[in-house]
Image (tube, helix red, strand yellow):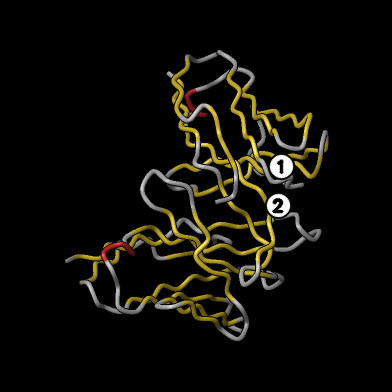
Amino acid sequence: DAGITQSPRHKVTETGTPVTLRCHQTENHRYMYWYRQDPGHGLRLIHYSYGVKDTDKGEVSDGYSVSRSKTEDFLLTLESATSSQTSVYFCAISEWRPNSGNTIYFGEGSWLTVV
Amino acid sequence: RKEVEQDPGPFNVPEGATVAFNCTYSNSASQSFFWYRQDCRKEPKLLMSVYSSGNEDGRFTAQLNRASQYISLLIRDSKLSDSATYLCVVNLGGNAGNNRKLIWGLGTSLAVNP
């Protein structure tokens, strides 16, 4: 258990509306990530954060913004949702564990449908 | 060529069978390697890291071949509960702790049948 909570878990929204997904972690992890997963594309990094107010773009950042005003929360915002942003969104943290080394652990996902 | 390639399957095997998956990667500078497991409509979960000398965790064995740029996962004595998609992940490295350079395969689907 990575101690990550995503909200909302499921959301249906209309094209053109703003949407914010929240990722909350309880273990003081420095690095946090937002991914999307789509058939045929696999997991793709949207944005990541390496500390409070420190964020950077990933592979598919267009149409998304993020904010991290405190260590435990990493917010993903779709400024104006489009149907192409219908996806499942996973938040993740980096953690080093014995026998596993340094890798990432995911939250349960947020299913977003844009109609 | 995709950076990380996996046979999508599906692999359909009976309980008790041994099954092996391969994953090839294109970047010779890749620094670390992992297998994740993902159940339908769930998040990916770390199955095991892959070390140069090979490593085993119960019924699961992972191997790395840097010369040929592939990693493998062997599952012995398959259980119904092993049915899932197995994702190969390659880390191109970066600052310690920051995993922003993970490259994910699309996954191999395994169905273990009674």
| Secondary structure under the numbered disc 1 in the rendered image | strand
Q: Point out the residue furthest to the left here.
A: B114
Q: Point out the residue furthest to the front here.
A: A26
Q: Are marks 1 and 2 in contact (CB under 8 Å)?
A: yes
Identify residue for label 2. Answer: B100
Q: Is residue B57 left or right of residue A32?
A: left
Looking at the picture, does residue B12 appear above or below residue B45? below
- Quick one: quadrant of the C terminus of chain B? bottom left
List x then y, in percent, for residue B46: 53, 60
List x then y, in percent, for residue A25: 65, 40
- The residue shown at (49%, 49%) is A42
Q: Nearer the viewer, residue B100 or A85?
A: B100
Q: Is residue A82 left or right of residue A57?
A: left
Residue type pointed to by label 2? Arg
**Chain identity of mark 1:** A
* Circle 1 Cα neighbour tier, 10 Å, few/some/many (<14 / 14–19 / ≥20): many
The disc label shown at residue A48, or none: 1
Q: Nearer the viewer, residue B58 or A45?
A: B58
- Quick one: quadrant of the N terminus of chain B? bottom right
- The residue shown at (78%, 32%) is A70
Residue type pointed to by label 1? Tyr
Measured in 3D between alpha carbons, the distance from the residue under mark 1 to the one under mark 2, in whole angstroms, is 7 Å
